[in-house]
Image (cartoon, rainbow, N blue to C red):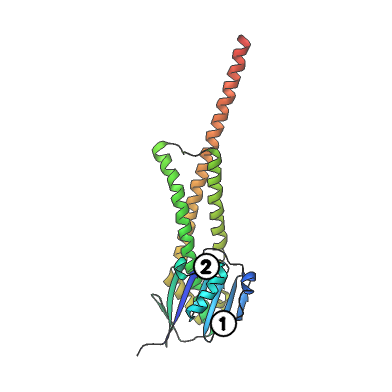
Amino acid sequence: MNKESFSVVALHVGKNIAIKEARNLFNYQLIKREASFLLYEASDNAYVYIKDYGSIVFYNCKNDIINQFLKKISKNENYGMKYYNKEEYQVYKSENLEVDFNAVYLNNFDIDFLHIIMLNLAQSVALEAYVKKTSSLYESTLVYTKQLEFKGRINLSKIKMRKFIGKTLNIKNTITEELFVFDTSNLAWSNESLSLLDTKLKEELDIEKRFKGLHLSLDTIKENLDLFNELSQHKYSSMLEWIIIILILFEVVQIFV
């Protein structure tokens, strides 16, 4: 006989979600809320968790509820699940608490346990989105490090270089700011079983390893940007020095003419 199970779908919408604004979009029962999240009961034993860094997690929700939330949050028609970073888990009723590949086995379906599951999946799917952004940034900087390797210079004007550095730093800072909220929920400290579930989920989802890897990538990008900026400053400082030298020589020549 198959065990009873419930589907959990976590999506990242590619942008931050204004929690105060989102709260006014839905008429479902709001059972938990803080400045950084909303937790709705969408129907009997169906929940929707909205996190401010762009994650939405649906527990045991039908497609019409999922589409309704996505459409209102995204504010456009391209709201199908194929447009988002996505993770899916199944939650099974079990005598023992366990976490396996894409599966959670629970002996307690209290809302706090479901909250821990949804929070970890929200973090995981957001991390995946940040990894993709960071990879794109890294690829952009790699173009110029290769130019340095093979040509000994970077083919960018001073203005374009500053724009590139500014754009990259803005994205990097946005990611870094959002990563500060990736922490263990206070719920996990309030109950031994909740703490165990939180730990098992973080281990299975590699939250800590991915988090550290993302920080290392961002640090590498920052080092590259610092180098580009230093080279840019040196290039134009040297040019200015040559201009001054030429002007001085011109003045000296004028004296003896």
Task: Please indicate, yes or no, whether residue 195 appears anywhere in the rendered image.
Answer: no
Q: Secondary structure at mark 1?
A: strand
Q: Measured from the top left, where is residue 8 in percent x and y?
A: 46, 77
Q: Earlier in the sequence, mark 1 or mark 2?
A: 1
Task: Reply above or below: 85 against 27.
Answer: above
Q: Measured from the top left, where is residue 70 in percent x and y?
A: 53, 71
Numbered tag placed on residue 22 in the rendering: none
Task: Please indicate, yes or no, whether residue 39 appears anywhere in the rendered image.
Answer: yes
Q: Residues within 10 Å of mark 1 (few under 14, many from 20)?
A: some
User: Quadrant of the image for the C terminus?
Assistant: top right
Farthest residue, direction bottom: 1
122 vs 79, nearest the viewer: 79
For label 2, the residue is 77
- Residue 104, quarter of picture: bottom left
Q: Residue at x 58, y 77 (%)?
A: 39
Across the whole image, how many numbered discs are drawn on residues?
Answer: 2
Q: Measured from the top left, where is residue 231 in percent x and y?
A: 51, 38
Q: In the rendered view, does 36 fall on the left or right side of 214?
A: right
Q: Residue at x 48, y 63 (%)?
A: 129
Q: Residue at x 43, y 45 (%)?
A: 143
The amino acid beneath tag 2 is: Glu
65 vs 55, nearest the viewer: 65
The amino acid beneath tag 1 is: Glu
Q: Measured from the top left, where is residue 230 in percent x and y?
A: 53, 40
State the separation of the CA atoms marked 1 and 2.
24 Å
User: Quadrant of the image for the N terminus?
Assistant: bottom left
Task: Reply above or below: 231 against 109.
Answer: above
For label 1, the residue is 41
